Image: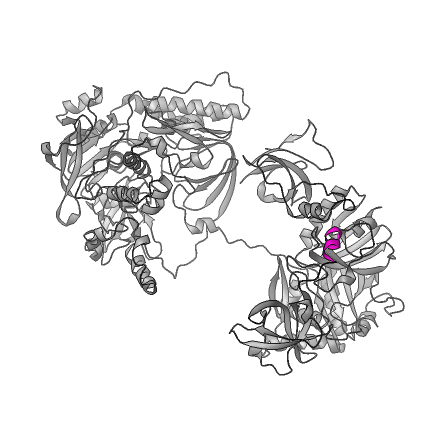
Amino acid sequence: MTERLPPQPGEWIDRSRPLEFQFEGHSYSGFAGDSVTSALAANGLRHLGRSFKYHRARGIYSLANHDVNVLVEDDRHTNIRGDVTPLWAGAKLRAVNTFGGLAGDRLKIVDWFSKFLPVGFYYKAFHSPRSLFPFYERRMRNIAGLGAVNANWEREHFPAAYDFCDVLVIGAGSAGLSAAIAAAGLGLKVVVVDEQPRPGGSFNYQWNGDAAAAKLWAVLAATAASLDVRCSTVAAGYYADHWVALVDEERLTKMRARAVVLATGAVEQPAVFGNNDLPGVMLATAAQRLIHQFAVKPFRRGVVLTANDYGYRAALDLQQAGVKVAAVIDLRATTTDGSVAANVKQAGISIHIGHAVTFATPSRGMQGIQSVQVSPLDSHGQPKPSANIDIPCDGLAMSVGFAPADGLFYQAGGRMAWSEDLQQFIPKSAPAGLFAAGRLNGVYGFEQEAADGSRAGLAAAAFLGKSIEQIPADPERPKQSPTHPYPIFPHPKTKCFVDLDEDVHYKDFVNAAQEGFDQVELMKRYSTFGMGTSQGKLANINAIRILAHVKGQTVPQTGVTTARPFYHPVSLGHLAGRGFHPHRRTPIEGQHEALGAVFMYAGDWKRPSYYARPSVSPQEAIAAEVTAVRTAAGMIDVGTLGKLEISGPDAGEFIERIYTGRFAKMKPGTARYGLMCDESGVIIDDGLVARLADDRFYVTTTTSAAGAVYREMQRWAQIWGLQVVLASATGARGGVNVAGPKAREILQGLCDFDLSTAVFPYMAVREGTIAGAPARFLRVGFVGEWGCEIHMQACQAVHVWSSLKMTGQPHGIRPFGVEAQRVLRLEKAHIIVSQDTDGLTNPYEANMAWAVKDDKPFFIGQRSLRIIRPRPLKRILAGFTLPGETPAAKVPKECHLIIENKEIVGRVTSITRSPTLNQVIGLAFVSPDRAQPGTPFQIRLDDGSLVTATIVATPFYDPQGERQEK
Amino acid sequence: MKLLRCPINGLRPLSEFLFGGEVRDMPDTAAITDEAWADYVFNRQGEPGVRKEWWYHTASGTWFIAERDNLKDEFVRTYLHSRDASPTETKAT
């Protein structure tokens, strides 16, 4: 650790805990509390990364996550941001995006032929011949980019947490902590977050020589110790009603605040000049962070470029750290004769007022700098190259201004306005409950920031109803701006970088503007400035200045780009959370598992698709289940069906309005088919409507529509003001359907009532018991055999299922799944709503005019169906078959199209091989003039070939319905 | 995520609610022309301003009406359908 300084007051490292690690195959050591980058710097490494496009050498720039020069990876993680990732013992790191290692990266030659890679080259080059584009694209993606993803990654789980507070303070600097103290002092629950590992903000690195600042920090730190301050926590995104995504190493916290204070500070901005990206060139705050937080000497002999007093302080910091400060270059034509400048003079550092750095001379191999070229500025602020001087140095610290960290403020819906005095945007209006403070609010100076923080904290408390006698006015903003209006000194022959993430340099902006991409959002997309990992934190304001300059307009006329989440990159693992996927289970699920069920999802439900048998294919297993129902008996879990109780004096009227059929004269103890349409006459659901008493109905819905049907019924009941009570029994009741020629015999052995047709006819409903369990019995025929749906309390479902299975065993009863049920119902040509119908299907198209009774005053959809009915149908659902021995490969699938003269004239909605009829059967939408039985038509398969099918009359099986009704 | 005040259950996150569309009275189906009926069925009022909307609190099965400024995406107030808006209404957020 050659560059490690003696212990510094307030340093973050723990010298008692050394950590060994490797970088690019070499071993180094650092301390606990080091970031990856600071540990590398402590070991004398300057060249820490290669740039995104030109593969230029890069080093420390902001040391604050405002650039991504130092991106490293290990075998497990890629794109680790070295500046803010704590070093860990045994880390084996390498730089991303190099070919053959960091030092000898073979692709650094890209920098030399970069004139062939002009701005927007993605859009210009490699488009002809078109056939070669995939090749170019692969090459390009190889060369330009960040780390490689390890595809054999092991999944990491990140929990998500929910949290709540009265006031969320983002930023734990002078303003943030003062706001938190003010709000907490009034009894509010306050949470403070800061992305840095320690609170204090710029107190950590910018306080040097300021006794008053040190004293203020001591007071704030002591008071804040009792607050809920969460460090290493990034407020990554701001969403509606003060819902803020907080990201720390372990989790994403969804923080709901009642009010928010944004004290996010300001981001120090670089100057633009030739080779301003080389290792050794850095922001003054980066040098100060290195010295004060990590006790690392940033360079040996340095120059400070400044436009404010902060730069003078940085010069003193550097000198104190043993850096030989060769000169302070001040961009300003005149300077305040402040005490800081006097101290610098006294320290023997030469000061060049009204000068600029225009070029950094690279050291060997472009891996650092050996001097900077300094030019005096004329009265227009233009460098005079004739009077250049060269100052040897291996480092340059820049302090030319700040830009507010306003990403969250914009995301929250705040508006900013340009302050010409301050040369930065300051808040103009904020949504209710949001308060900006400190440097974000254009307030500079520790005391002033603290006062502004207190003001914001009190304002937040007042917003939350605390009585505050008087909220102080905004503190004064600085008379002389710390921010230079145009710290941009383009060098004619060298790249002057504006966006280091994306390797966008000054000339790119000029060219883009000349090519017509001279609106800020257009230029952003064309040049890609601000689109890199750090989202332009160091680039946006300079980009806007350059565009304004090129167009001869002001910064506010030029405008800003849109700030979107996230403020810092967030890992996909954090966003994915635990991969929570809820599903509903019927009470009988355990039984299905024991029987070898293969499950499928039906909406939220898990349902048995079929029951697997050893050495039997799924198709054979399904066919056997179908055959069991047709020849003996089958049982299926129908507990997923929607089950609604509708009662009250107006229940009958309600049913009449909801369903298309006629129910008024229905006798208690009977059931009817119910079809439901929406206002446009489109079928939305079907099921059974059973009348239990004059004022009590029990209806079933399809599995997937159960929730929506119940919801819409509730709404209609309110709108109509009818006296009805709706209750959903979907989850409370289990259901089993028993069907087949032996079903009645099996049930008779278990039930306490006579199941003969004379007493319990087709479409009857009654209460009774089965194996001692009370249940509701519905004589239905969905699968086309004698059948009975049994609905019982969920807790009795397993008992009923097991009893049926045991009693039915000698009769050959067999459980069947959803697949067999689909075959069985298709043999009967019963439609499945949303499979055989789509979002436009009306009952006439579904061949179900019989279910619509228009001779009643009203039902939902009636008015539309009255318009539709007289018009010619555009399509109709019809049954079809394929010739007997169609090979499996030539059987169409659902949604295959019907083709006539190369035009699409219809679509297959259901198709299956019927084990009962030993033939492929299906339903399809066809044009009405082609719907006569015997009409041939052609279906196109996946491979483009056509097969011929023939319309037949439906149902395919037992057309008279004798088997189900007998 | 936005917050919405259910008249029965108070202020809850938007993920607990479903949007139910604009509040519209169904016209008299016996008197209305085909064209006017089609307009009712298919067209919706989308212009900026304070709109009356149906919202459903899924956890409790509560339908209610929210008046929302769709330009600012701000809820103005919420109340049950059975009552007309009265001064005692709870503010939406």
Left or right relative to A95: residue A806: right
Q: Position of residue A213 (x, y in %)?
A: 31, 24
Give whichever of A15, A329 is nearer the camera: A329
Give whichever of A122, A303 is nearer the camera: A122
Q: Position of residue A697 (x, y in %)?
A: 81, 53
Give the colouring mode of the picture. one colour
Residue A733 appears anywhere in the view: no
Q: Position of residue A355 (x, y in %)?
A: 16, 29
Q: Which quarter of the figure has residue A768?
A: bottom right
Residue A656: in magenta span = no
Q: Position of residue A865 (x, y in %)?
A: 73, 55
The residue sitting at the top extreme is: A469
The magenta region covers A862-869
Task: Judge whether A802 appears above or below A564 on screen.
Answer: below
Residue A868: in magenta span = yes
Q: Quadrant of the N terminus of chain A?
A: top left
Q: Which quarter of the figure has residue A338?
A: top left
Q: Quadrant of the C terminus of chain A?
A: bottom right
Left or right relative to A915: residue A725: right
Residue A61 appears anywhere in the view: yes
Dominant secondary structure (helix, strand or loop) of the stretch shown in magenta:
helix
Left or right relative to B19: residue A407: left
Q: Residue at x 84, y 63 (%)?
A: A764
Left or right relative to A918: residue A763: right
Tell how many labels. 0
The residue sitting at the bottom extreme is: A885
